[in-house]
Image (cartoon, grey):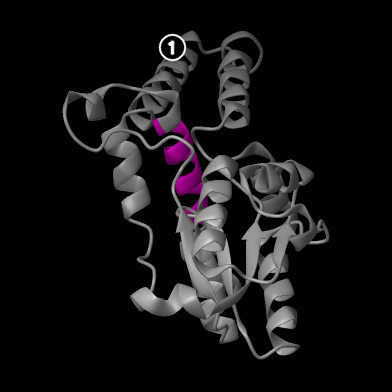
C-alpha cells in the first residue's frame, strides 16, 4: 500500500503535468503497441483532454476546493496572542509568503520558522520580515512530518504559534492539529492567483484554475488516505 501511495504521489492528481503525460503514454501504448485498439485509444485521449478542459474551468476548480472540510472558527483577536510564526512549504508559495507577512505585521512574533524550501526563506525576508528572525528547517518532507515538528515545538513552550499554509492544504493540517490537540492558530493563505468566482470569466478555462483543481483533488485523496490510516478522524 505504501509503495502504491508513493507511486501515486509521484504522478500527482488529475490536473498535474505528470498525470497528463502518463495518461497520454497509456493512450499511445493502447494505440500502437498492445492491445492495438485505435478506437479505445482515441476515446481515452479525448476523455483526458475533456477532463483537463473541465478542470481548468474556475467554477469547477472552486467547486472542488470548496468541498474540502471547513476550517474551525477563530476569534478575531487570536492573532494578537501569537508569539511565533511557522510557515509550511507547499503549493502556492507566493500566497503563503503574503499571508506570513500579514500575520507578522499584525502580531510581530519574536521568531519565524520555515519548514521547507530555501526559496521561501529568501521570499519571506524580501517581503519585509527581518532576516535574522527566520529559521529554516528542511527536515520535514511532508505534512505529517511538519505537524509532528509543530507538536514537538509546542511541547517545549507555553506560548501560541500560528501556522501558515495554503487554503487547500489547511483542512488536512486542521485535521492533524485536532488529532494532536494542537493549540496553533491556522492561517490559511490564498492561492498565488485566485480564479474568478463570478461573471463570465468563471467559465473561461485558465491554467490557474487547473492548478487549484489539481491541488484540491490531491487534498481530497490525502484526507481519505489519512482517515484510512487512522491519523485523523
In reply to whether residue 221 is colored magenta, the answer given is yes
In reply to whether residue 78 is colored magenta, the answer given is no
From the top left corner, tell me how far across and down residue 68 is, in percent: 38, 58
From the top left corner, tell me how far across and down residue 149 is, in percent: 74, 73
Residue 223 seen from this side: no
From the top left corner, tell me how far across and down residue 191 is, in percent: 46, 43
Kindly identify the residue that appears in the image at 67 percent across and 53 percent down. 5
Q: Which residues are magenta?
A: 209-222
**Is residue 46 rendered to the left or right of residue 174?**
left
**Is residue 46 rendered to the left or right of residue 164?**
left
Under tag 1, what secondary structure? helix
**How would you classify the magenta stretch by its main secondary structure?**
helix
* Residue matched to label 1: 39
Q: Is residue 183 above or below residue 146?
A: below
Kindly identify the residue that appears in the image at 48 percent across and 76 percent down. 80
Which of the two residues, 144 or 230, is positioned nearer the viewer here? 144
Residue found at the far left of this picture? 199
Which of the two residues, 125 or 61, is positioned nearer the viewer here? 125
Quadrant holding the N terminus? bottom right
Q: Residues within 10 Å of mark 1 (few under 14, many from 20)?
A: few
Which of the two residues, 25 or 156, is positioned nearer the viewer here? 156
Amino acid at each position: 500500500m505504501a509503495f502504491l501511495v508513493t507511486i501515486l504521489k509521484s504522478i500527482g492528481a488529475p490536473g498535474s503535468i505528470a498525470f497528463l503525460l502518463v495518461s497520454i503514454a497509456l493512450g499511445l501504448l493502447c494505440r500502437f503497441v498492445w492491445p492495438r485498439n485505435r478506437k479505445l485509444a482515441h476515446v481515452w485521449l479525448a476523455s483526458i483532454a475533456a477532463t483537463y478542459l473541465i478542470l481548468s474551468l474556475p467554477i469547477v476548480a472552486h467547486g472542488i476546493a470548496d468541498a474540502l472540510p471547513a476550517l474551525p472558527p477563530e476569534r478575531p483577536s487570536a492573532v494578537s496572542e501569537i508569539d511565533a510564526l511557522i510557515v509550511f512549504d507547499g503549493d502556492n508559495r507566493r500566497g503563503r509568503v503574503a499571508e506570513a507577512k500579514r500575520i507578522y505585521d499584525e502580531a510581530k512574533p519574536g521568531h519565524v520558522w520555515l519548514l521547507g524550501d530555501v526559496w521561501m526563506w529568501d521570499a519571506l525576508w524580501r517581503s519585509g520580515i527581518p532576516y535574522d528572525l527566520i529559521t529554516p528547517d528542511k527536515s520535514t518532507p511532508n505534512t505529517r512530518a511538519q505537524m509532528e515538528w509543530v507538536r514537538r515545538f509546542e511541547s517545549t513552550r507555553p506560548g501560541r504559534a500560528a501556522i501558515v499554509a495554503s487554503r487547500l492544504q489547511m483542512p488536512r493540517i486542521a485535521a492533524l492539529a485536532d488529532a494532536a490537540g494542537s493549540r496553533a492558530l491556522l492561517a490559511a493563505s490564498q492561492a498565488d492567483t485566485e480564479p474568478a468566482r463570478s461573471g463570465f470569466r468563471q467559465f473561461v478555462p485558465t491554467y490557474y484554475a487547473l492548478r487549484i483543481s489539481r491541488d484540491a483533488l490531491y487534498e481530497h485523496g490525502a484526507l481519505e488516505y489519512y482517515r484510512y490510516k487512522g491519523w485523523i478522524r
